[in-house]
Amino acid sequence: MSRASQLTLLGTSLFAVSTVIFVHFQQKSEKEAMHQGVVRDMEQQRIKRERQLDFDTQKALEEEYKKGQTVSQSLAHLPDKPLPSR
């Protein structure tokens, strides 16, 4: 083989190997990024469930407190007269 053909073979071989290595690391990086997205989504779902549980608990407490309270419409029984001015 001539020197030019050897250099061409070496150059193309190095280019092919470097391309394979680059693609390998790029795929690993993309896979890790996708995994981080899944982790972030799971965390958001956990927070949403916690907030919903807090909301449901507060709603149940509100209903319980409303059962024990009697609120009358006191403003409806007031006569229509203006408030005194200062």
Image: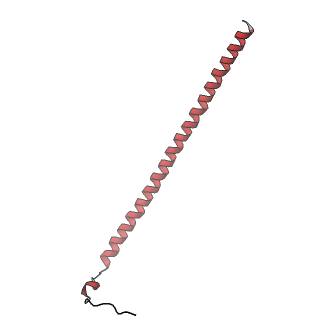
Q: Give residue 81's quadrant in the image.
A: bottom left
Identify the residue shown where x is 63% and y is 21%. 16
Side of 35 relative to 16 (left or right):
left
- Residue 69 in the image, given as x and y percentages of width and height: 31, 79
Side of 74 relative to 10 (left or right):
left
Vertical side of 37 occupied by 81: above or below: below
Q: 70 or 86, which is in the foreground?
A: 86
Vertical side of 28 occupied by 17: above or below: above
Identify the residue shown where x is 39% and y is 68%. 58
Identify the residue shown where x is 62% and y is 29%. 22
Q: How many marks?
A: 0
Quadrant, the C terminus: bottom left
Q: Residue furthest top?
A: 1
Q: 46 or 31, which is in the foreground?
A: 31
- Residue 14 in the image, given as x and y percentages of width and height: 67, 21
Side of 43 relative to 11 (left or right):
left
- Residue 82 in the image, given as x and y percentages of width and height: 30, 90
